[in-house]
């Protein structure tokens, strides 16, 4: 069983979902600390002028270093939620697939969340549904018998608790991952291999990567996004599995 692990992100980029699709279980770290300036509460789009802008969830950061991410509450939802929708209308309203995608996003914003984590997870579940990803999502807080730890230790403890024999890591974790500890635990460690697809992007002189997957969806629609996504997923074969990533 292959496990992927990541903090909940807000309407993440395509690479986030690649990691999810290549895992049998994808663990969302809802008990870690909020990282200031991270994609845990914001993400990027291209605005109507072709510039990068942020959709940002207003969070109550008072005492955030002493709290789990799942306990970070939102604030001023009546301000930022309609602002997000207005930004998306102005940024992508002229796109061919706006009428297909916007109602799905609008539904996400119908109910104000209590916490940032809650809204992140809602956004992740929405995109996973559009992409037809069947990976099981598990909250860190629901896994029994996980010993505490940071970074490498925490990841290894989660893998052990779930009975994983494979762990798919992001490349950014190489700097703190102790590969020997995974080998000693009998867990095959692989780093994510990904070639990010490009697509016809409205309003930009040069392609801008690393955006929320909403940019791809609005520009090329759900069907083409799914095709590009699964082509990307199948190009990476980190664990050399014959049967995987089926939609």
Image (cartoon, helix red, strand yellow):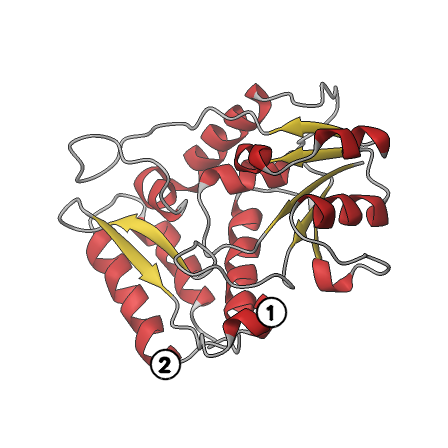
Q: Give the residue number, with chain letter if any, for mark 1.
A: 70
Give residue 211's position: percent from left, percent from top.
35, 43
Point out which mark residue 15 bears: none
Q: Quadrant of the C terminus?
A: top right
Question: Image quarter for residue 233?
Answer: top right
Q: Give the residue number, with chain letter if any, for mark 2.
A: 76
Give residue 176's position: percent from left, percent from top.
61, 38
Q: What SS does tag 2 mark?
A: loop
Who comes first in sequence, dot 1 or dot 2?
1
Give residue 220's position: percent from left, percent from top.
34, 37
Q: What SS does tag 1 mark?
A: helix
Q: Is residue 123 above or below residue 46?
A: below
Q: Is residue 168 above or below residue 160?
A: above
Nearer the camera: disc 1 or disc 2: 1
**Residue at (33%, 46%) from the top-left corner?**
218
**Residue at (51%, 72%) from the top-left corner?**
64
**Residue at (33%, 73%) from the top-left corner?**
80
For label 2, the crowd category at 10 Å Cα-Cα, with few meaning under 14, some 14 to 19 and many 20 or more, is: few
Of the pair 161 and 228, the residue shown nearer to us: 161
Of the pair 139 and 152, the residue shown nearer to us: 152
């Amino acid at each position: 069983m292959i496990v992927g692990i990541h903090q909940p992100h807000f309407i993440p980029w395509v690479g986030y979902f690649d990691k999810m699709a290549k895992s049998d279980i994808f663990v969302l770290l809802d008990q870690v600390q909020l990282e200031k300036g991270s994609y845990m509460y914001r993400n990027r789009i291209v605005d109507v002028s072709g510039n990068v802008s942020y959709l940002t969830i207003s969070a109550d950061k008072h005492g955030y270093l002493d709290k789990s991410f799942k306990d970070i509450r939102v604030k001023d939802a009546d301000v930022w939620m309609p602002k997000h929708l207005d930004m998306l209308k102005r940024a992508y309203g002229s796109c061919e697939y706006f009428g297909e995608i916007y109602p799905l996003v609008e539904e996400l914003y119908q109910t104000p969340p209590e916490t940032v984590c809650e809204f992140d997870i809602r956004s992740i579940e929405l995109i996973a549904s559009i992409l037809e990803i069947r990976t099981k999502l598990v909250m860190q807080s629901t896994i029994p018998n996980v010993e505490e730890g940071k970074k490498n230790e925490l990841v290894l403890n989660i893998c052990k608790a779930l009975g994983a024999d494979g762990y798919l890591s992001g490349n950014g974790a190489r700097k703190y991952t102790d590969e020997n500890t995974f080998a000693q635990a009998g867990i095959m460690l692989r780093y994510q291999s990904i070639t990010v697809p490009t697509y016809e992007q409205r309003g930009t002189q040069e392609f801008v990567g690393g955006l929320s997957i909403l940019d791809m969806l609005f520009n090329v629609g759900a069907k083409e996004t799914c095709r590009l996504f699964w082509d990307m997923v199948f190009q990476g074969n980190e664990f050399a599995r014959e049967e995987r990533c089926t939609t």
